Image (cartoon, helix red, strand yellow):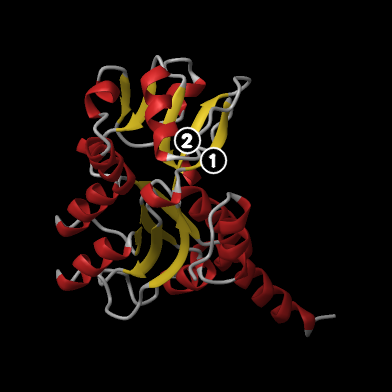
């Protein structure tokens, strides 16, 4: 049995070393694709023992933080943000992958009848009749928040909206509906569907819809031995596609 002892000792040493080989790495993401990234991160951690540490902000917030030098190995945002960060030398050129798209929708307190949102006039009527409206705060710099603010101005209903708006800076504006602070919410569909107590009515009419693409890319600050590249591949692989479809987002066309 003696010859087996060195093998056993070596095996024990390797098993002891495995946890030390596991690495943490930072992923900074905007809110709309956060659920997708959460799901991919959980599977990635289980499969590899590496730990993605997620940080969330709005698209504008992500850009400001990365440009200011905050560390992140993978950055998840809109193509426009990532392209700007490439120009600023913060993102590896050519590393961007587009993995999901989502539109803007309307949600309502669970249990209430779904209103008609099939036309622009129906949207105007809904805004006029709703006693309270939850919205993402455009000052936070979120893509859909800025768009929705501009849309209401173009439709001539900004004053009516502002009189009853409940704003959420970051996170899910639909939380304000779930808590009873508002009756309806306008936000990206992927940020309405995950909220319990809120029912998705549907997307905005096509003529006033905004479809946003979400992408991920490798930071120039990522360490050479970081598992960030493998995580990026996971987002773009079967796990990422399954997560995208499970929360009602669509793969890019």
Q: Is residue 109 above or below residue 243?
A: above
Residue at horizontal 44%, vertical 51%? 206
Q: How far across and down, in percent of the image, does residue 164 sit? A: 31, 17
Report whether 229 appears left or right of 142.
Answer: right
Q: Give the residue at mark 1.
A: 202
- Which residue occupies the extreme bottom position in the image? 3
- Give the image quarter of residue 85: bottom left
Q: How far across and down, in percent of the image, does residue 237 sit? A: 57, 72
Contact flag, marks 1 and 2 (Cβ < 8 Å): yes
Q: Judging from the image, what secondary structure is the residue with disc 1 in? A: strand
Q: Which mark is residue 106?
A: 2
Residue 247 shows up from this direction: yes
In the foreground, 156 or 179: 156
The first of marks 1 and 2 along the sequence is 2
Q: Is residue 44 above or below residue 110?
A: below
Residue 172 shows up from this direction: no
């Amino acid at each position: 049995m003696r010859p087996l002892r060195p093998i056993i000792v070596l095996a024990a040493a390797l098993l002891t070393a495995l946890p030390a080989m596991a690495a943490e790495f930072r992923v900074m993401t905007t809110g709309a694709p956060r659920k997708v990234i959460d799901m991919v991160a959980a599977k990635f951690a289980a499969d590899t023992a590496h730990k993605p540490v997620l940080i969330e902000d709005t698209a504008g917030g992500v850009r400001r933080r990365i440009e200011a030098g905050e560390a992140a190995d993978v950055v998840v945002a809109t193509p426009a943000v990532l392209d700007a960060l490439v120009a600023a030398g913060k993102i590896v050129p050519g590393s961007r992958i587009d993995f999901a798209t989502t539109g803007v929708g309307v949600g309502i307190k669970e249990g209430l009848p779904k209103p008609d949102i099939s036309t622009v006039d129906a949207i105007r009527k809904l805004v006029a009749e709703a006693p309270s409206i939850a919205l993402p705060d455009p000052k936070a710099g979120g893509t859909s928040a800025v768009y929705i603010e501009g849309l209401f101005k173009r439709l001539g209903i900004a004053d009516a909206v502002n009189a009853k708006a409940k704003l959420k800076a970051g996170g899910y504006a639909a939380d304000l509906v779930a808590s009873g602070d508002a009756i309806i919410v306008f936000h990206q569909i992927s940020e309405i569907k995950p909220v319990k107590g809120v029912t998705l009515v549907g997307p905005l009419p096509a003529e006033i819809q905004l479809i946003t693409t979400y992408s991920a890319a490798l930071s120039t600050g990522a360490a050479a031995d970081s598992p960030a590249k493998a995580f990026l591949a996971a987002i773009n692989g079967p796990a990422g596609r399954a997560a995208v479809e499970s929360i009602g987002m669509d793969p890019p066309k």
